Amino acid sequence: MRGYQIRRFRGNGCEIGLYMGKHLKGRFKSIIDNFLKAVDRAYHLDCNRLGKEALACLSRLPEEYQLEVESLAYGSAVKLDRIAQWIYCDRFVTNGCSGFIACMNDTVWVGRNFDHAGPCLWRNINVIEKESRIPVVIFGQEGSLFSHTGFNLRKLWLHYNHLPAWDEPDPEEKSVPPFVFIRMALENCCCISDVEKMLQATVRNGGMNLFAVDGKNNTYAVYECTCRGYVKRQTSKAFITGTNHYTATMAPRGAKNGDPTSVSRQKRMEELLAAHGIEDPYRDYIRILSDPKVEQDLGDSGTVYANLACPSKDLYYYACNGFPAASKAAFEEVVLP
């Protein structure tokens, strides 16, 4: 029995949201309630702020995605403001996630640990085939229209880790959360240069360490993104790593730039990638993700899912049915319908 489940949604934006909502009808409210409780235990939700800001944040999304969320609410019979709170609560998560990109025999692999609240609540893969858009595959919870991690059928892989930002947009300014940016980019970009153009054309409402791999030609990049700008990191090694702090971007005086756990996780990945001769990518890269100094287990939060992928070979593995996921869950190959 697989540890994950796959759902496929096709059509225009209204149809995608509606079909997803109908699939979840009768269950979606409890899914949301359970997750918000998990986030509160781990990160202490500001319920007053959540109630005031969630719908306003939703209203600043591109209209096509607002329509999807509204249709999701209609199809599931869950109030729109509750779904908006479920989406918005990611703003309370300020640290976590580790990732690397490594090149072996001219073939690029990408690994990532996704750290959040709600162990074993992230067992879903949604395949979204929207009219006039590139089909995308995203990892997360049931009902997710957006994600921190995904790939498209042009072999483009994207994921991000949270970064602090000091240039947040004004409250009335149009902006997108980083997890919405991931969906936008995957649906509209065929290559890494397209992703750069989208970074230039959008304002995000949070920072991100953005990892990109193009499996068509085994090219890759990591971008340190503030809300309005980005720096493309350079490396002379056969790998590049990232967690939750800037390494190539000069932070303004007094600005927060990660914390000691972020620095130690990145250092540990670099040590392991440099020290071990990689013979079996599946075995050896998973060993790095599951290392206790890379993976996180904070009880109510930690590594809730992990991915290993080789886009050029159409190999994608997902570990989600255990906590912490990189060491306690099986990395299962993603077999698309």
Image (cartoon, rainbow, N blue to C red):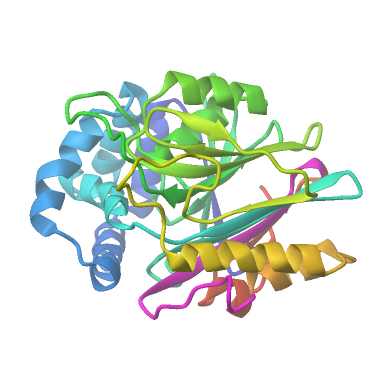
Residue at x 37%, y 33% (from the top left corner): 227
Determine the residue positioned at 12% across, 50% down: 49
Which is nearer the eye, 216 or 98?
A: 98
* 302 inside magenta stretch: yes
The residue closer to the viewer here, 3 or 44, is 44
Give the vertical position of 285 relative to 71 (above or below): below
- List x then y, in percent, for residue 275: 80, 69
The quadrant in which the N terminus is found is bottom right
Q: Is residue 4 left or right of residue 108?
A: left
Tell me residue 198's x, y (percent). Answer: 50, 23
As displayed, is residue 315 above or below residue 170?
Answer: below
Task: Report the span colored magenta.
Answer: 291-312
Q: Nearer the viewer, residue 291 or 33?
A: 291
Residue 83 visible, this orientation:
yes
Left or right, 93 with respect to 170, comes to right
Residue appearing at x 26%, y 47% in the figure: 88
Can you give x and y, in whole percent of width and height, for residue 94 in the image?
Answer: 34, 57
Q: Is residue 282 left or right of residue 267?
A: right
Residue at 44% x, 18% y: name it. Answer: 201
Q: Does the magenta segment cover residue 61?
A: no
How many numbered marks have been drawn onto this rendered protein structure? Answer: 0
In which quarter of the view is residue 178 placed? top left
Is residue 332 or residue 185 the one in the foreground?
A: 185
Q: Is residue 107 above or below residue 56?
A: below
Query: Is residue 146 in view?
Result: no
Residue 29, image x and y in percent?
A: 24, 58
Residue 334 placement, left or right of 7: right
Q: Which quarter of the picture shows residue 312?
A: top right
